[in-house]
Each structure stands twice: as C-alpha cells, then as structure tokens.
C-alpha cells in the first residue's frame, strides 16, 4: 500500500515538473533589433582629401589593439601601461563591471527551483476553549482542548515560479545587456585615459623644447646685449639701444620660469593619470623633436568602424536592456504561476521523528492573477517604453557625435600638415631676417629696433612651430580615440553572460 501511494506521488510530481519545462517558452515583448544608424552615403568610407601618399593606407585597414605603439616611444608605452594598471577611475570601473555581471547572474536565479530545508521544534498547548481541532497553522492535527505536546518538524520546502510569459528571462536579458554596457563604459574610460596620457606626454615634450628654444634665444640675446653695451661704452651707439636690448632679454628671461611652472604642472597631471603621487615620476628633459614621428594615419576606414566605439556600443546595449524591460513590464499583466511544495517528517514524539509513518508531503500549483493594482502595471509599461525611446534618441545622437568628431579630427590633420609646411618656411625666413638685421645694424644701415623685432619674430616662430608639431601628434591620438581605439576580433563579438 505504501509503495502504491509513493508511486502516485512520484508520478504527480514528475507530471508537474514536465509541464513546467514545457510551458516556459513564451516571451512577451519585441525582440531587439539594432536601429538604423542613418549613415550618410558620403560616409561609406572616412577619407582625408589632399593627404600625402606617406600618410595613406589601404581602405578597410583596422588600427592595432595597442595603437599607441605606432608612436614608437618606449617611455610613452610605459606610462600608458602604468596608467591602465594603477589609475583609480579604471579600477573603479572594473569593479562596476563585476557588480553588473553579478546582477546579471542573479537575475536568472528565478528560472530555477528555490529549495530550502527547515527544522523546527515547538512546545504547544491547545486552548481549552477550542472544541474544533484546527487543520492548519503551526500545530496542525487533532488534540483535546488544553492538551500539551511537542511538535518536531523537518521539511524540504520548494517554490518554483513558471516563467510562462518570459518575465524572468526578459529581466535576465536586460541585466546581461547592462553588464555588457558597463564593460563598454570601462573600455571607454580606458580609451580616454590612454588618450589623455598620450596628449599629456606630447605636451610635456613640447614644453621641454620650448624651454630649450627660450633658453637658447636668451643666451643669444644676452650675447647681443654684451656687444651693444661694449659699443655703447665706446660711444658707438646710444644708451637707448642698450635699454632696448635689456628689455628684450627681460622678456625672454621671464618666459623661462613660466615654462618651467607649466611643465611641472603637466608632469603632475601625468603622475595623477598614472596613479602616482606628485613629483614621483622621473621624466627627464627631452625635446619634442626627439620623439617626433608621423605614424601611418588609418584613413579610408569603413564607416561601420564607428560602431565599435565604446560609447556607441554602450548605449546600444542599454537600448537592448530597455527593450527587454518592455517585455518584462508586459508580463506583469498576466498570471503568476508557481509550483509550491513541502515534504518531510513531522511528529509529536522525538523517537518517532524520522520514521516512515511520520512523513508528510504537499505539492501543487499556485496561481496569482492581478485584478486591480491601481495604475501600477500600466505605469510600469509606460515607463519602460518611454525609457526605450529616450535611449533610441541618445543612440542616434551618439552616432552623429562620433561622425562629427572623426570629421573634425580628419580636417585638423589635413590642415595641420599644410600649416607645418608654412611655419617651417616662416622659421627659416625669420632666422635669415635676424642675421641680415644684425649685419645691417653693424653696418649702421638700420636701427637696433629692427634687430629686436627680428629676434622677437624668430622666437615666436620657433615656439609656434613646436606647438603645431605637438598639436598634430595630439590630433593623431584624438583620431585613434574618435574611431574607438584599437579592437581585437575577440572584443568585437558580443558575449552572453551566464
């Protein structure tokens, strides 16, 4: 008899489990589809008109993952590696990714049965005024009024919500997309960090060369002042020429401490980016011309490379999550079906606790149908749909911003190349003009004002040339950032979190 009853219970439980597996297949809400990005027809490829052949590469080339290595600078490579390892913003973003992944894993827990083990001991006294024996509560069973007895209970409790409408699966889909978006946010922070370190490093070397230029010109001006002073002492020139020479020397000398101050501040920024204390980096003087290189510019890149930018991928994944939230919100309008059960041993005698006769078991489905909850479910759905539309607009705006940034930096690179050519001619002409002015002054053909003006022009031209050279290097860094940096093929595949 016991075997028949046990077999009957087993068949019932097995039937419920099979039904649960079969019914968990419906998903409410639309499946995600990537929106049209509205890429202009003339942006099928990104090109730089007028660029020299040395800066051209084949259409469809993709930057390397460690793209900063194209500058062939070991010192810069080391700084970037330190920044990625020690920068606190990057480390904080990494922990946010871990948090998001944990939430994604936890979101799928509702797809599985929730099982717990309970063990209790209760001392019970039955009320003397109750004449009907209760059938439930903490002390079910029959006992006379006023009876005192013990209750030993050991039970295995089960609750398994059947995801008939896909509410749990849509929630898991949303959390998984948000976890992937969090990882894209981290990569965006890394990309910005590398760009900041590269630009900061080239700015530091620009200041080194500007200091060298200012110091060299100061030495030349001091030599000129000595010559003028000697000629004034001999009565060949007036004291006015001496004073004019002193003014120029003072102007140039005043630039030197200012450049040193700016260089120190720039080094502090690099130390901050690399997670170091101020004045802890040993960065000796190194003029920009010693690190100047013109790496191959990745022009002719396909326009869809912009969709590899971390910010675009991030907002797309957030859009995917918002789409899943719509399906989750719609599922709240439908009944919640769960399988609940409890089974174990219950007795009033400790010695009879785990005997077969003390077993008890209950299992069956429960259904909860929302009838009236105010405006809760409707509001939840409207919020989800509104958030999706907001993110859709943000997605389109992010892509437009990406195209604008790439167009801006390509234009800057093209014009900088032309600008450098003119500025190099300017420096050469200014140096020749200074030499002629000095010769003509010694011959008495011009005043010392012409010499002073020529010397000022040389200093300004040399400083401006170095500034433009640095600007072109930072434009190259900006281009790599604008196209999403370097991506390995393994990073282009969207992974599904467990």
Image (tube, helix red, strand yellow):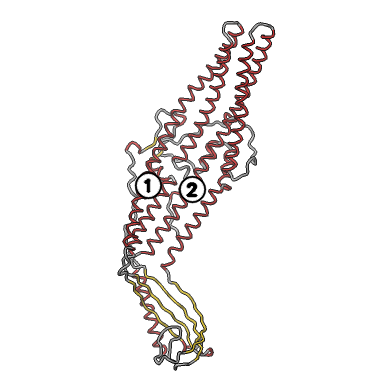
Extreme residue toward the front, this view: 129
Disc 2 element: helix
| C-alpha separation, residue under disc 1 versus residue under disc 2 | 19 Å
Label 2 Cα crowd, 10 Å radius (few <14 / some 14-19 / many 20+): many
Q: In front: 483, or 149?
A: 149
In the displayed structure, 199 sits above or below 444; it is below
Q: In the displayed structure, does residue 131 sit left or right of residue 250?
A: left
The answer to which quarter of the image holds residue 255 is top right
Mark 1 in CB contact with mark 2 (< 8 angstroms): no
- Closer to viewer: mark 1 or mark 2: 1
Q: Residue at x 37, y 61 (%)?
A: 170
In the displayed structure, 317 sits above or below 435; it is below
Q: Residue at x 60, y 39 (%)?
A: 268
Q: Which residue is mark 2?
A: 187
Q: Residue 33: horizontal and vertical position, in percent? A: 33, 52
Q: In front: 246, or 83?
A: 246
N-terminal label among 1 and 2? 2
Disc number at residue 289? Answer: none
Q: In front: 333, or 124?
A: 124
Disc number at residue 394? Answer: 1
Q: Residue 16: horizontal and vertical position, in percent? A: 36, 76
Q: In the displayed structure, does residue 97 sit left or right of residue 73?
A: left
In the displayed structure, 393 sits above or below 404; it is below
Disc 1 element: helix
Extreme residue toward the bottom, this view: 144
């Amino acid at each position: 008899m016991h075997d028949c009853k046990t077999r009957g219970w087993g068949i019932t439980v097995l039937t419920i489990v099979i039904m649960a597996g079969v019914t968990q297949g419906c998903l409410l809400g639309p499946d995600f589809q990537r929106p049209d990005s509205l890429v202009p027809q003339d942006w099928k490829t990104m090109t730089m008109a007028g660029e020299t052949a040395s800066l051209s590469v084949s259409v469809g080339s993709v930057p390397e993952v460690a793209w900063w290595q194209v500058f062939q600078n070991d010192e810069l490579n080391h700084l970037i590696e330190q920044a990625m390892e020690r920068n606190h913003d990057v480390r904080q973003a990494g922990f946010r990714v871990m948090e998001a992944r944990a939430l994604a894993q936890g979101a799928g827990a509702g797809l599985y049965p929730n099982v717990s083990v309970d063990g209790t001991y209760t001392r019970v006294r039955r009320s003397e005024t109750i004449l009907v024996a209760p059938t439930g509560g903490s002390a079910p069973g029959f006992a006379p009024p006023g009876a005192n007895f013990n209750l030993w209970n050991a039970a295995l409790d089960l609750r398994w919500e059947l995801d008939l409408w896909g509410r749990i699966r849509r929630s898991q889909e949303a959390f998984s997309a948000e976890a992937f978006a969090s990882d894209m946010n981290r990569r965006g922070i890394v990309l910005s960090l590398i760009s900041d370190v590269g630009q900061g490093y080239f700015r530091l070397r620009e200041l080194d060369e500007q200091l060298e230029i200012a110091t060299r010109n100061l030495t030349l001006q001091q030599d000129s002042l000595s010559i003028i002073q000697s000629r004034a002492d001999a009565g060949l020139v007036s004291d006015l020429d001496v004073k004019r020479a002193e003014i120029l020397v003072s102007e140039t000398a005043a630039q030197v401490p200012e450049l040193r101050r700016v260089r120190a501040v720039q080094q502090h920024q690099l130390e901050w980016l690399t997670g170091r204390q101020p004045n802890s980096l040993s960065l000796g003087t190194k003029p920009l011309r010693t690190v100047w290189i013109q790496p191959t510019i990745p022009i002719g890149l396909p326009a869809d490379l912009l969709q590899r930018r971390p910010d675009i991928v991030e907002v797309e994944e957030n859009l995917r999550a918002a789409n899943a939230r719509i399906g989750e919100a719609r599922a709240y309008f439908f009944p919640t079906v769960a399988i609940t059960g409890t089974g174990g041993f219950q007795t009033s005698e400790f010695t009879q606790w785990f005997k077969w006769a003390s077993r008890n078991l209950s299992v069956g489905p429960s259904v909860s149908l929302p009838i009236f909850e105010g405006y809760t479910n409707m509001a939840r759905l409207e919020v989800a749909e509104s958030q999706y539309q907001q993110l859709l607009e943000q997605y389109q705006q992010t892509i437009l911003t990406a195209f604008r940034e790439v167009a801006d930096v390509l234009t800057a690179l093209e014009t900088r190349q032309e600008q450098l050519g003119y500025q190099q001619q300017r420096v050469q002409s200014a140096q020749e003009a200074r030499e002629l002015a000095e010769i003509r002054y010694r011959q008495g053909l011009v005043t010392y004002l012409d010499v002073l003006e020529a010397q000022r022009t040389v200093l300004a031209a040399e400083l401006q040339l170095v500034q433009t050279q640095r600007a072109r290097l930072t434009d190259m860094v900006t281009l790599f950032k604008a196209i999403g940096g370097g991506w390995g093929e393994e990073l282009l595949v969207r992974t599904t979190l467990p």
